[in-house]
Image: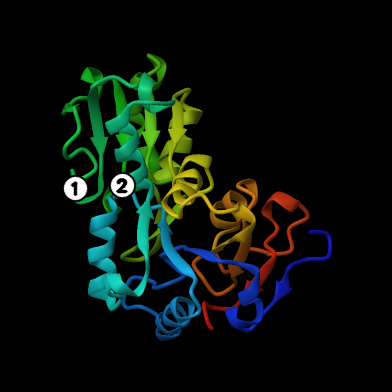
């Protein structure tokens, strides 16, 4: 977009441009404490206008866990049409084993997850092993704050990378909120593993599988009638543009320091807005 993104005050200004909405979670609906009041009102107005709303999150946890969290923060499940997470897409891929990268992965999994959460492997034909040396692949779903620094993992992952152990990253985000501010997220550890020589496959924004799954969930509409709203150029905007969707960047979100007027069309949103509002 050589002329730059158009800044708008609210979605009512572009309501005729889309039929479906994909909403990022963190920085868009909330920042971990409670749902933004303007976001709650915006969802209600979108539903009244007949728009379908799907929450699209790079959470390594499954959809049900995220829906429960949103409800606890003040957004009931009847406020939107569904939720799709990178963890859910990873789980579905590992369950079906129909396409790459899932079909090529073995059955012995070394799981890295936040708080010991194992829901991403529940119901799967996988053996979770305690030693990475016994694994066929690494499943990276989340990180505890204390283990977020990629360098902490060098002793455990160097050998795995050397022997070609594949990693499936179910959360490509590079940063996340910790107790003391932004800290490295699973995507940062995945990048670190790649620098060690490891092979990494990603599930989540901006990569194609999660956007394809979103279109399937919405009934395969034209991507040109789907609006992705989020606060990340590298994840929300880039993924939407690659999928042929419309993109709106929120300037006051987690990635508020990013310049929306990217010289690269692949990273240029169609519109910008301060925060999600009607």
When the figure is inspected, residue 251 is found, relative to residue 172, above or below; the finding is: below
Where is the N terminus found, in terms of image quarters?
bottom right
Residue 270 is left or right of residue 103, and the answer is right
Residue 203 is left or right of residue 238, and the answer is left
Where's residue 84, x and y in %? Answer: 37, 54
When the figure is inspected, residue 201 is found, relative to residue 49, above or below; the finding is: above
Where's residue 23, x and y in %? Answer: 47, 64
When the figure is inspected, residue 153 is found, relative to residue 160, above or below; the finding is: below
Would you identify the image quadrant in which residue 136 lies? top left
Would you identify the image quadrant in which residue 74 lies? bottom left
Residue 77 showing in the rendered view: yes
Residue at 60% over, 53% down = 222
Residue 144 is left or right of residue 49, and the answer is left
Where's residue 89, x and y in %? Answer: 36, 43
Say the numbered circle drawn on residue 142: 2
Which residue is identified by label 1? 117
* Disc 1 + disc 2, Cβ < 8 Å: yes
Query: Dot 1, how many residues are within 10 Å of its Cα: few (below 14), some (14-19), or many (20+)?
Result: some
Q: Nearer the viewer, residue 189 or 231?
A: 231
Is disc 1 placed on a helix, strand or loop? loop
Is disc 2 placed on a helix, strand or loop? loop
Residue 257 showing in the rendered view: no
């Amino acid at each position: 977009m050589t002329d730059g993104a158009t800044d708008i005050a609210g979605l009512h200004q572009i309501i005729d441009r889309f039929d479906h909405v994909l909403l990022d979670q963190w920085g868009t609906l909330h920042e971990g404490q409670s749902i933004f009041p303007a976001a709650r009102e915006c969802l209600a107005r979108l539903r009244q206008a007949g728009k379908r709303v799907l929450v699209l999150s790079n959470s390594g946890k499954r959809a049900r866990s995220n829906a429960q969290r949103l409800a606890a923060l003040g957004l009931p499940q009847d406020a939107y049409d569904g939720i799709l997470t990178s963890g859910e897409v990873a789980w579905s891929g590992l369950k079906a084993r129909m396409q790459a990268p899932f079909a090529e992965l073995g059955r012995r999994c070394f799981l890295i997850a936040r708080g010991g959460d194992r829901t991403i492997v529940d119901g799967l034909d996988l053996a979770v092993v305690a030693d990475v040396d016994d694994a066929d692949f690494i499943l990276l779903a989340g990180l505890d704050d204390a283990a977020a620094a990629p360098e902490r993992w060098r002793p455990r992952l160097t050998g795995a990378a050397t022997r070609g152990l594949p990693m499936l990253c179910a959360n490509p985000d590079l940063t996340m909120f910790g107790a003391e501010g932004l800290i490295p997220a699973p995507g940062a550890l995945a990048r670190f593993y790649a620098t060690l020589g490891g092979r990494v496959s990603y599930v989540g924004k901006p990569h194609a599988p999660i956007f394809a799954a979103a279109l399937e969930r919405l009934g395969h509409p034209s991507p040109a009638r789907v609006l992705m709203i989020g606060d990340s150029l590298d994840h929300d905007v880039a993924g939407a543009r690659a999928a042929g969707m419309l993109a709106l960047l929120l300037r006051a979100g987690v990635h508020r320091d990013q310049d929306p007027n990217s010289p690269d069309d692949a990273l240029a949103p169609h519109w910008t807005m301060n925060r999600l509002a009607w």
